[in-house]
Amino acid sequence: MAKSPIIGIMGPGEGAIADWMLFAEKLGSAIAREGLTLLTGGRPVGVMEAALKGCRTSGGTTICVLPGKDKADASKYCDQVIPTGMGNGRNLINILSSDLLVFVGIGPGTISEFGLGLKEKKPMILGPGAQKLWNLAKEMEIPLVVFRTDDIPEILEIIRRNM
């Protein structure tokens, strides 16, 4: 049985703005329609909640990697909940468990996930609100697979080419 690629959507929780959340919800829905699995940090807030909602309401499968120990802290849109009790250390699990990462917005946790993605040489797409991460990637001149686009069809095409 073929395994569905896992697409991690990384973005801020409490610091997310409405435009990022709307984009994340649409992207989550598109990921579901492609038959891909969505992974997020699993909390019921911000980009995480929006992406999970989009995926689940479109019939997709979601994985949620929580910072705490209690499954009850997860979004209601989580299919599989992984409580870690690791706090922000769970960001490494997010990165290692994802086949490709899409960043929507920016916040302290998102920045740490981007750094871990660079270290692990994961293919990454920098979407809306992630321009500063793109600038950083260009300045570092690291030969990695990093793309920059705010267009969902283009994101899906990049995912297809890199899976």
Image: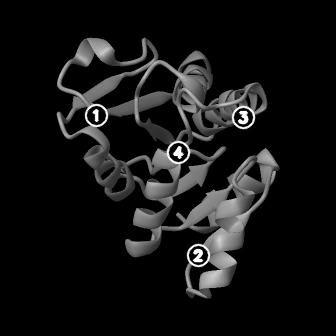
Residue at the spot of label 2: 145
Please tell me in which quadrant of the rendered image residue 21 appears.
top right
Residue 143, compared with residue 46, is above or below; it is below
Q: Sequence-wise, which precedes: disc 4 or disc 1?
A: 4
Q: Position of residue 54 (x, y in %)?
A: 62, 24
Q: CA distance from mark 4 to mark 1?
A: 14 Å
SS state under label 3: helix
Q: Which mark is residue 67?
A: 1
SS state under label 1: loop
Relative to 72, 139 lies left or right: right
Q: CA distance from mark 3 to mark 4?
A: 11 Å
Residue at the spot of label 4: 10
* Marks 4, 2: nearer the viewer: 4
Looking at numbered disc 2 in the image, what kind of residue is underneath it?
Val
* Marks 1, 2: nearer the viewer: 1
Q: Sequence-wise, which precedes: disc 3 or disc 4?
A: 4
Q: Sequence-wise, which precedes: disc 3 or disc 1?
A: 3
